[in-house]
Amino acid sequence: MLAPRPEMTVTERLSLYIQLTRLHRPIGILLLLWPTLWGVWIAGEGHPAWHIALIFVLGTVLMRSAGCAVNDYADRHIDKHVKRTQERPITSGRIAPGEALWLAAALAIVAFLLILPLNNLTLLLSVPAVLLAASYPFTKRFFAIPQAYLGIAFGFGIPMAFAAQLGSVPPVAWLLLIANVFWAIAYDTEYAMVDRDDDIRIGIHSSALFFGKYDVAAVMACYATTLALLVWVGQVTGSGWMFYAGLLVAAGIALYHYSLIKNRSREACFAAFLHNNWFGAAVFAGIALDYLMRTP
């Protein structure tokens, strides 16, 4: 593998770092941000402390970026066999693997510094959060449905949000986390359907391979389970009609995704994956508007 070019300018290196951390493709940040905001808003009963909300938004960006760097390090020998990923900075030799790890560590440290003003329980929960984010990229080598692990990693901001604002993690936080796991399996299976042939050839696991010919049915079942669990969350929190209206919009979005993935076209499956931003946004809008309407 080629070493990074010594004549590379600061601007060129920053451009490579942006590519490495996927800041030019914010869908991953958004899929991590929405469930985090679900937790922040419900824990704060619609009026979260704004410094806490800001910390979690910034932390989401930093940890997602660090996770991408670790992912590309872990997949550096796999990505060269997949046309879509052959030009990633590490695989193409423009960034050294060790440099990517240093960048990931620096981003994680900044994220940790952000939560230092918060309570001890939040700090304690940050440990498994980091371990989940760092270990997820390796799970596709041995775990049949690594997307479930991704759902835990992407949703761990939920219990942290409750801990930061309440000093405890009530059962509804874990219910919300489980809902996010099923949503992650749904959207990341759509993503895995794009790379199905490459995954078979390389020999790594994905939910698309695990579900096989039932992949479309599994995706829709996961959407249905997500929405059912969110209805349960609404019952626990005493939510009103705006909350359920948000879920109804999300259900409509899920049905639209069915129309995209039913023929298993690569382009349509990828479009469905990207469109999950609006599913998460619809749920958050329902939560936020419901609490807003409760305000006297």
Image: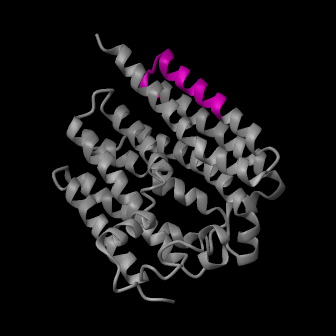
- The location of residue 14, given as percent across then percent down, is 34, 67
Query: Closest to the observer: 21 or 257?
Result: 21
Q: Which residues are magenta?
A: 236-253
Q: Quadrant of the C terminus?
A: top left
Question: Is 263 rendered above or below residue 46?
Answer: below
The number of discs equals 0
Specify the principal SS of the magenta part.
Answer: helix
Query: Closest to the observer: 50 or 81?
Result: 81
Task: Decide if residue 88 is in sight here.
Answer: yes
**Extreme residue toward the left, this view:** 117
Residue drawn at the location 60% of the way across and 41% of the way down? 275
- The location of residue 144, given as percent across then percent down, is 67, 66
Query: Closest to the observer: 29 or 22?
Result: 22
Task: Decide if residue 132 is in sight here.
Answer: no
- The location of residue 197, given as percent across then percent down, is 77, 67
Residue drawn at the location 50% of the way across and 66% of the way down? 136
Residue 209 magenta: no
Colour mapping used in the image: one colour
Question: Is 46 rendered above or below residue 91?
Answer: above
Residue 240 magenta: yes
Quadrant assignment, res 139: bottom right
Question: Is 127 rendered above or below residue 255?
Answer: below
- The location of residue 236, given as percent across then percent down, is 46, 28
Residue drawn at the location 39% of the way across and 76% of the way down? 100
Q: Is residue 254 left or right of residue 184?
A: right
Residue drawn at the location 66% of the way across and 28% of the way down? 252
